[in-house]
Image: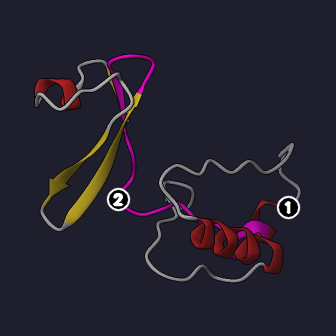
Amino acid sequence: MTTENCIIKNQGKCINYKNSDKLSDKAANFDVVCEFGHRNVILNSVPINLSDKMKEFSGKDIKGLEFLFTTENKREVEQIIESYQKGTKPKGNFTRGMYFK
């Protein structure tokens, strides 16, 4: 989700528009990153992963696959890419987003 009202600036934590922070809601933590000045992007609490469901998209008008890594470390990026290459279920917590609702 994108907000035009900067959460980080409103908390007095803004330094040169290159900050990040977290929001908490019950048991979930959402990373908040600055984008284009004082706009914030609130990230999902867990990554979206469809690595073991790609066969269900065959025959659809999909031009390619694009990854958007935000707060993942090098090892997490490697594991995600490997799960897509092998078509295996991802490790750890993840969501399917709204793709299968």
Residue 35 image point, x, y percent: 44, 26
The residue under label 2 is 45
Q: Secondary structure at mark 1?
A: loop
Residue 31 image point, x, y percent: 33, 49
- Mark 1 in CB contact with mark 2 (< 8 angstroms): no
| 89 sits to left or right of 31 | right
- Camera-nearest residue between 11 and 101: 11
Residue 55: image quadrant is bottom right
Q: Is residue 21 above or below residue 19?
A: below
The residue under label 1 is 58
| 89 sits to left or right of 100 | right
User: Which amino acid type is marked by label 1?
Assistant: Ser
User: Which amino acid type is marked by label 2?
Assistant: Ser
Residue shown at the point (35%, 59%) measured from the top left = 45
Is 85 inside the magenta-drawn segment?
no
Q: Secondary structure at mark 2?
A: loop
Work out which quarter of the rendered image holds the N terminus and state it.
top left
Mark toward the viewer: 1 or 2: 2
- Camera-nearest residue between 37 and 42: 37
Q: Which residue reaches farthest front?
A: 15
Residue 49 image point, x, y percent: 59, 65
Magenta residues span: 35-54
- Camera-nearest residue between 16 and 24: 16
Residue shown at the point (45%, 18%) measured from the top left = 36
| 57 sits to left or right of 93 | right
Overall secondary structure of the magenta section:
loop
Cα–Cα gap, marks 1 and 2: 28 Å
Of callouts 1 and 2, which one flags the residue occurring earlier in the amino acid sequence?
A: 2
Q: How was the colour assigned to the protein in this rendering?
A: secondary structure
Counting other residues with Cα less than 10 Å from the Cα at mark 1, is it few (<14), some (14-19), or many (20 or more)? few
Residue 87 image point, x, y percent: 77, 78
